[in-house]
Each structure stands twice: as structure tokens, then as C-alpha cells.
């Protein structure tokens, strides 16, 4: 997550930064790593604020919404060890 992405989402009525204690959801902050709905990611991309994506962790069906040629320039690699992601 980036500050720009989270601000954009709030501006369009999606508030992932808002804590929801009833769902045990603390709210997202910049640098969090979370799954993003493909349509929301594409809308953020079109606004110039899409966060990076890890293609190896992206569900193949996302390609029904976002073309691979749009995702590739936004992709980042991560090492296989999850402990290195902290």
C-alpha cells in the first residue's frame, strides 16, 4: 500500500484505512501488503496511483480485468523467503 493509493481509495468511497473493529480489521497503512481487487487497482492505475504488484502472487483471473501488459511495468519481485518481506 502507498499513501497515494490509500488516499485515492478514500476519495472514491473505499476506505481501506478505516479500522473496522467489528471485523477485527485494523485498517491499512502505507507499506502494508494486501490483496487488492483488480478493478480497484485498475482504477488507481488509471489515476496514476496504483501500488506495485507481485505477479507471482496475483490471481490469474485478475487478467480478465487488468491486461498483463498493464501489470508488468508495476510488478516487483520478492524473494521466496517471506521473512525477508518485513
Image: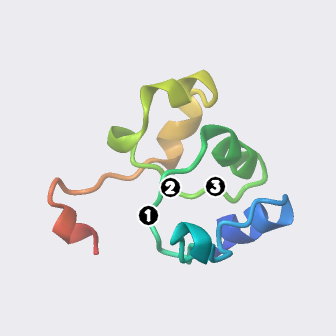
Q: Is residue 6 left or right of residue 82?
A: right
Do the CB atoms of the residues marked 1 and 3 lie less than 8 Å apart? Answer: no
Say which element carries label 2: loop
x%, y% of residue 3?
64, 75
Q: Which numbered dot is residue 52?
A: 2
Q: Residues within 10 Å of mark 3 (few under 14, many from 20)?
A: many
Question: Which quarter of the picture shows residue 56?
Answer: top left
Up-down relation of residue 22 to residue 59 (above or below): below
Say which element carries label 3: loop
x%, y% of residue 37?
60, 44
Q: Residues within 10 Å of mark 1 (few under 14, many from 20)?
A: some
Coloring scheme used = rainbow
Question: Which quarter of the picture shows residue 66?
Answer: top right
x%, y% of residue 44?
72, 52
Do the CB atoms of the residues marked 3 and 2 lie less than 8 Å apart? Answer: no
Q: Which numbered dot is residue 50?
A: 3
x%, y% of residue 53?
47, 50
Q: Residues within 10 Å of mark 2 (few under 14, many from 20)?
A: some
Residue furthest to the left in view is 81
Residue furthest to the front in view is 22
Q: Is residue 61 visible?
A: yes
Q: CA distance from mark 1 to mark 3?
A: 13 Å
Looking at the image, is mark 1 or mark 3 nearer the viewer? 1
Q: Residue at x 39, y 48 (%)?
A: 54
Q: CA distance from mark 3 to mark 2?
A: 7 Å
Q: Residue at x 20, y 62 (%)?
A: 82
Mark 1, residue position: 33
Amino acid at each position: 500500500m502507498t499513501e497515494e493509493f490509500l488516499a485515492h481509495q478514500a476519495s472514491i468511497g473505499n476506505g481501506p484505512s478505516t479500522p473496522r473493529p467489528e471485523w477485527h480489521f485494523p485498517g491499512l497503512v502505507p507499506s502494508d501488503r494486501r490483496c487488492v481487487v483488480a478493478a480497484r487497482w485498475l482504477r488507481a492505475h488509471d489515476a496514476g496511483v496504483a501500488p506495485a504488484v507481485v505477479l507471482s502472487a496475483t490471481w490469474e483471473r485478475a487478467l480478465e480485468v487488468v491486461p498483463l501488459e498493464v501489470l508488468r511495468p508495476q510488478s516487483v519481485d520478492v524473494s521466496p523467503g517471506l521473512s525477508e518481506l518485513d
